[in-house]
Amino acid sequence: MINSAWHNLISLAPYALSHEEKAAIFAKYGNELVKHHYEHCQPYQNILDFFHLTEQTFEQAPPLHTSMFKLHELRSIQQNDVFKVTTSSGTTGQQVSKIYLDKTNIARQQKILSSIVKEWLGNKRLPMLIIDHPNVIKDRFSYSARGVGIQGLSLFGHHHTYALNEDMSINWPCVEGFIEQYKDEKIFIFGFTFMVWQYLLQLLDKNQKRFELSNALLLHSGGWKKLIDQAVSNEQFKTTAQQYLGAVNVHNFYGMVEQTGTIHVECEQGHLHCPTWSDVHVVSPDNLIPLPIKKSGIIELHSLLPTSYPGHKILTEDTGFLVGIDDCPCGRKGKYFQVTGRVKRAEIRGCSDTQS
Ligand SMILES: [Zn+2]
């Protein structure tokens, strides 16, 4: 039932709907989604019952904190239908979030990710340089956040080349061979923010090497914590990438393993954009009530994608603020926002700040 509703949603454009048009979609499909999880996930039903909601609507349903996915097995499908479990990659000894996916949900995540990424990369697959080592995706049943990112984005590339060896050293012959072959074409570079900084840009600097790419797009994501510790800003990251790689457009994106598929890509103005299928609220740390534009608080992420697990409303451990709605100078509709850091005293989740 809930899956059939998706036929209407899947072909929408990522950044074309106004706030009002999107609100109507979230009211209609979001409400169905809440009912679906209420009926198919006993722990979720218990949570909603606990709050004695007058209606089981998307608006009234409380967000689940990311830690709930570490502590409980939250799935709205039978065990037999679990096709893949994705995890956040915590440091050793920490509990990780477990996200249970069936084939339908995986296909939908991939389709939506594809619609979003094509807006930035174009329709053609590009030669792809991955700033990681190949063994990060060796286990095909269980992926860490890094594996999920690489696996999802690999579909937009060809001649996938892993830039690193397993000990995080640069595989120079591989990287130099790739660049020699494709330096005159548009290429796609992907990596986690810290990995790109530490194991590519810093090493190019140390070895006094520079590449002269003619047309590249670098998409990167992951925690900024380690870079903030090293006092590296987003702006400095971009400038350094251009200094050492050549003509490269750099776009950060924000997403979580709990809502794989709906990523929030940074536009030319430096704003993270909500695609059609997701919404962001910035809520007060005191009472979780949504805050107005420009007010800092905790980021709550909504997504219409999750049907096999109740990940449609997530309270993150990130802080940020909404910059505006529907009026970014880049021309894309929807909410746009910035992430400023982590909730203080939150459990350090690790995520892709951690090598694994
Ligand atoms: Zn924009």
Image (cartoon, grey):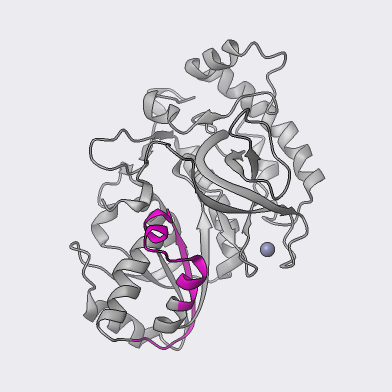
Instruction: Describe residue 241's horizontal placement relative to residue 61 as left or right.
Output: left
User: Magenta stretch?
Assistant: 210-239
**Image height check: is 250 above or below 113?**
below
**In this view of the protein, which residue sits in the foreground, 257 or 128?**
257
Instruction: Describe residue 36's horizontal placement relative to residue 256 as left or right.
Output: right
Q: Count the marks: how many?
A: 0
Ligand 1 position by quadrant: bottom right
Residue 261 drawn in magenta: no
Residue at image position (44%, 35%) is 102
**In this view of the protein, which residue sits in the foreground, 343 or 212?**
343
Q: Residue furthest left?
A: 167
**Image height check: is 221 above or below 10?**
below
* Residue 19 x %, y %: 78, 47
Q: Is residue 229 visible?
A: yes
* Residue 202 x %, y %: 31, 74
Task: State the quadrant of the N terminus.
Answer: top right
Q: Residue furthest right?
A: 20
